[in-house]
Amino acid sequence: MNTATNKMRPDWHPADIKAALAKKSYTFARLARENNYVENSPNMVLKKPWYQVEKIVSRIIGIPAAEIWPSRYDQRGKPLRNGRPRVRKHSAKIPATLA
């Protein structure tokens, strides 16, 4: 998967995601109940990134999350943060006097 290709492909329309879930006999309410979320809170995944729910939706539908939401993932299929690749930060060492 190419990053440029991901940027060119649009994310699935929310109605298409709901329809794909419905074909598997799922609603966002059922998804919430089965995964201990507040009722219908997983609907937020339709508007903004929520990696944990994206994984659940992609598992139910049977299509990788990076194909459903290409704008939210990099070329390796890793989730982006704020539309940019994640950068590992080095953890600051805690001084021995504080540890």
Image (cartoon, rainbow, N blue to C red):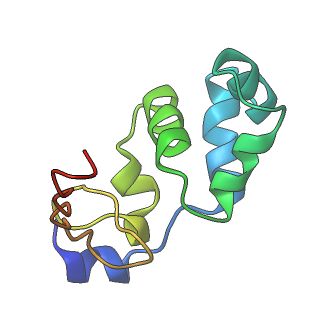
Q: How many labels does the image show?
A: 0
Seen in the picture, residue 34 relative to 9 is either above or below; the reply is above
Q: In this view, does 35 lie to the left or right of 73?
A: right
Quadrant that contains the N terminus: bottom left
Measured as percent of width and height from the top left, residue 56 is found at: 50, 32
Q: In this view, does 62 lie to the left or right of 48?
A: left
Closer to the camera, 25 or 32? 32
Quadrant that contains the C terminus: top left
Closer to the camera, 66 or 50? 50
Measured as percent of width and height from the top left, residue 78 is found at: 25, 56
Instruction: Write the residue at 61% across / 38% down.
Output: 20
Seen in the picture, residue 33 relative to 65 is either above or below; the reply is above
Tell which residue pokes out farthest to the right in this image.
39
Instruction: Write the residue at 65% across / 28% down.
Output: 23
Instruction: Write the residue at 15% across / 51% down.
Output: 96
Tell which residue pokes out farthest to the top in this image.
34
Q: In this view, does 11 lie to the left or right of 63?
A: right
Closer to the camera, 88 or 65? 88
Instruction: Write the residue at 63% across / 21% down.
Output: 35
